[in-house]
Image (tube, rainbow, N blue to C red):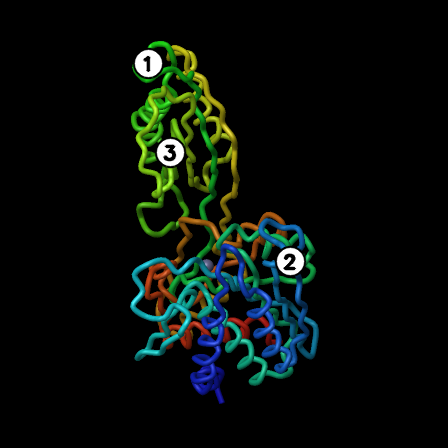
């Protein structure tokens, strides 16, 4: 039997596995049922000859006895020594949100689609990689090296209780793992080389409280923030829009530096819906925004930070009574795997062989767990490749295509053949 035929024969198994994964509501936050989903994958892979480890990321953000951050790493050694190919999938899913016409955890099959929260991002990818690995091992029991599959926590909230923790424990050390494929939903004919960086900060403008009828006796922090936003519009946004990248970021709009203003708040705290009183008349002495600045592999985070600081310092010298605080919230550095890296060339050839189409290279506008494998694990031979349409992620009525899962499993299997069979 060919490997592709073997994978086709596992169609029902693939569907049932995907459904079983979707039916465990691993919602993050707060991080529910992580042990259950890891145990499901562990039981299955043990039965296929994998050695497994359950690892709790103790003390990472969100970890508690109520919501422990569980991860699973499973490894199957070949008959002779060789390289290790590691498939990493996050098992957490984002909140359900409104607008569903199906049970988000029912995993209904309709035609070629399986519906559910996490179907596309990324339980379908996890299931496809498991089927690919199992089929490869059955077809080539004498393979060289090792196959690893991990199901990890908290990718949707930064991956600190998942891949970052495992990387710190040495699970991605180059001596142990040589190739990493992350089956995030980037479409079956695309190879994702990496992602942009992110810099998050809170900016607060300061004022002085006074009676609202005599604003000249105080100092309005909201007007100061208005000046900041005006500077963003006139200086920062045009400067960012002019910065283009060699990274093949999709969609096109993200092929430049971008910034979102995540929130704004000034003055009195908003009251609950159950409060029907009128506001007191005060000049606000504080206004805060949170900014979400995405940057390119051609930029560095020091310049990104300095650009915003320069703008604020400029206002301090030009604007009467302007004062501010800036608090950095988080930094993620960009990651970009070279097109000539072995895992890229191998998956490129596998897409050609299996699907008969020319693959395209992409990079992700947001980040995913590659950042930790790159920065902490120091492993630069890593891509995202998996079934599903990126646009479906986090949406109502999220679905994964069964044919897409089968096709991408065949590509993953072909990649294993190229990397783990002695010539
Ligand atoms: Zn994902």
The answer to whether residue 314 of the structure is visible from this angle is no
For the residue pair 1 and 10, the one nearer the viewer reads as: 10
The answer to whether residue 327 of the structure is visible from this angle is yes
Q: Is label 3's Cβ within 8 Å of ligand 1?
A: no
Disc on the earlier residue, 3 or 1: 1
Q: Is label 1's Cβ within 8 Å of ligand 1?
A: no
Circle 1 SS class? helix
Q: Label 1 crowding class (10 Å Cα cut-off): few <14, some 14-19, many 20+?
A: some
Q: Position of residue 104 (x, y in %)?
A: 38, 68
Marking on residue 207: none
List the residue tagged with mark 3. Answer: 264
Circle 3 SS class? strand
For the residue pair 320 and 414, the one nearer the viewer reads as: 320
How far apart are labels 3 and 2 at the CA level?
A: 34 Å
How far apart are labels 2 and 1 at the CA level?
A: 51 Å
Residue found at x 56% / y 85%: 139
Disc on the earlier residue, 3 or 2: 2
The number of discs equals: 3
Q: Label 3 crowding class (10 Å Cα cut-off): few <14, some 14-19, many 20+?
A: some
Circle 2 SS class? loop
Residue found at x 65% / y 75%: 76
Q: Position of residue 187 (x, y in %)?
A: 38, 64
Circles 2 and 1: CB atoms closer than 8 Å: no
The mark closer to the camera, 3 or 2, is 2
Q: Is residue 33 left or right of residue 14?
A: right
List the residue tagged with mark 1. Answer: 215
Q: Position of residue 232 (x, y in %)?
A: 34, 28
List the residue tagged with mark 2. Answer: 65
Relative to 233, say whether 333 is above or below: below
């Amino acid at each position: 039997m060919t490997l592709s035929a073997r994978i086709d024969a596992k169609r029902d198994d693939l569907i049932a596995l995907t459904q079983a994964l979707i039916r465990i509501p691993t919602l993050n936050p707060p991080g529910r049922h992580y042990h259950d989903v890891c145990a499901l994958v562990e039981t299955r892979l043990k039965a296929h000859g994998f050695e497994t480890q359950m690892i709790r990321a103790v003390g990472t953000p969100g970890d508690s006895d109520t919501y422990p951050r569980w991860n699973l790493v499973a490894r199957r050694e070949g008959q002779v020594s060789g390289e290790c190919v590691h498939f990493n999938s996050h098992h957490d899913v984002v909140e359900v949100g409104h607008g569903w016409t199906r049970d988000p955890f029912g995993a209904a099959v309709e035609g070629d689609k399986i519906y559910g929260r996490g179907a596309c991002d990324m339980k379908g990818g996890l299931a496809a990689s498991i089927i690919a690995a199992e089929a490869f091992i059955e077809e080539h029991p004498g393979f060289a090296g090792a196959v690893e599959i991990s199901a990890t926590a908290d990718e949707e909230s930064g991956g600190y209780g998942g891949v970052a923790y495992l990387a710190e424990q040495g699970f991605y050390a180059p001596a142990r793992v040589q190739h990493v494929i992350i089956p995030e939903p980037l479409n079956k004919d695309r190879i994702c080389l990496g992602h942009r960086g992110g810099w998050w900060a809170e900016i607060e403008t300061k004022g002085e409280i006074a009676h609202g009828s005599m604003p000249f006796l105080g100092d309005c922090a909201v007007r100061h923030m208005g000046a900041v936003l005006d500077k963003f519009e006139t200086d920062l946004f045009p400067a960012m829009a002019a910065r283009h990248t060699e990274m093949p970021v999709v969609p096109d709009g993200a092929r430049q530096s971008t910034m979102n203003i995540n929130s704004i708040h000034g003055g009195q705290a908003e009251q609950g819906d159950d409060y029907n009183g009128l506001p007191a008349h005060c000049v606000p002495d504080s206004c805060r925004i949170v900014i979400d600045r995405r940057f390119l592999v051609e930029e560095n985070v020091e310049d990104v930070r300095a650009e915003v600081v320069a703008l604020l310092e400029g206002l301090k010298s030009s604007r009467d009574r302007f004062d501010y605080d800036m608090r950095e919230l988080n930094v993620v550095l960009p990651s970009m795997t070279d097109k000539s890296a072995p895992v890229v060339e191998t998956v490129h050839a596998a897409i050609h062989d299996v699907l008969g189409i020319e693959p395209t290279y992409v990079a992700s506008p947001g980040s995913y767990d590659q950042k930790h494998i790159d920065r902490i694990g120091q492993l630069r031979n890593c891509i995202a490749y998996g079934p599903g349409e990126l646009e479906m992620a986090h949406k109502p009525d999220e679905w994964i295509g069964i044919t897409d899962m089968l096709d991408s499993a065949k590509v993953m299997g072909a990649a294993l053949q190229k990397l783990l069979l002695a010539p």
